[in-house]
Amino acid sequence: MSGGATIWFTGLSGAGKSTLAVELARQLDARGARTLLLDGDDLREGLNADLGFAAEDRIENVRRVAEVALLFARAGHLTLVTVISPYTAGRQHVRRRHATSGVPFVEVYVATPVELCEARDPKGLYRRARAGEIVQFTGISDPYEPPEDAEVVLLTEGRSPEQSAAELLAYLCSSGIATAGGGSPLEATPR
């Protein structure tokens, strides 16, 4: 099977990565694309449950997620990955791994200001980090290195998830990863 790709969402906790990926999957599914969502929180409950949040654990988390994404993309899925992936080196490794494998890779930077992420704080993590209950929290006590070469930068402030996902879908269509009529350029088999 061919026609798969990895769409890698990066950004701070609360930036809207998962919300946007779910909406993009909905829009792609409506066009007959084969999508798969790999959510960082879900993967940390299972595959990566043995990892903490020290720098070396974050690097390993990204590496493992990249390998799973690559497997599904090779099988023809448009694989949507939502992982904070705070370090440039980790994201560059993912990009190189996909390039070496001949699998398209699209980095999407969900560029939501930390103040807005903190205001949203759906899980209360920023509050806990500010209180010192969580150490090594990305954007507060641990760095987030914004991408310098992301294919798509989504500024979500004041925009609906539908608008942002439509912008991303337009990019995927213009780059040949998805087609306006549905699916991927090489395959549009509904699930």
Image: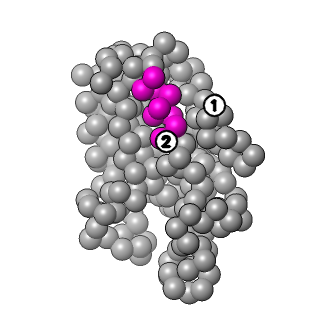
What mark, if any, has residue 55 been given in the picture?
A: none
In terms of depth relative to the viewer, which is nearer, 20 or 138? 20
Q: Quadrant of the N terminus?
A: top left
What's the magenta bit mostly, secondary-structure-wise? helix
Instruction: State the residue position of label 1.
Output: 167
Question: Identity of the amino acid at label 1?
Answer: Glu
Q: Quadrant of the C terminus?
A: top left
> Compared to 28, does 161 lie above or below?
below
Q: Is residue 130 magenta?
A: no
Q: Residue at x 35, y 37 (%)?
A: 36
Would you call the spot at circle 1 few (<14 residues within 10 Å), some (14-19), or many (20 or more)?
some
Query: Where residue 135 sits in the image (x, y, percent)?
Result: 50, 82
Numbered range of the magenta stretch? 22-30
Query: Where residue 95 sits in the image (x, y, percent)?
Result: 43, 43
Q: Secondary structure at mark 1?
A: helix
Question: Identity of the amino acid at label 2?
Answer: Ala
In terms of depth relative to the viewer, which is nearer, 19 or 171? 19
Query: Where residue 41 sits in the image (x, y, percent)?
Result: 40, 59
Q: Quarter-wise, where is residue 72 in the image?
A: top left
Is residue 108 found left or right of 153 in the rendered image?
A: left
Q: Secondary structure at mark 2?
A: helix
Q: Give the Cα distance between marks 2 and 1.
A: 12 Å
Q: Quarter-wise, where is residue 121 in the image?
A: bottom right
Q: Is residue 25 magenta?
A: yes
Which badge, 2 or 1, comes first in the chain's sequence? Answer: 2
Is residue 21 found left or right of 66 in the rendered image?
A: right
Q: Residue at x 32, y 34 (%)?
A: 73
Instruction: State the residue position of label 2.
Output: 21
Q: Residue at x 57, y 20 (%)?
A: 174
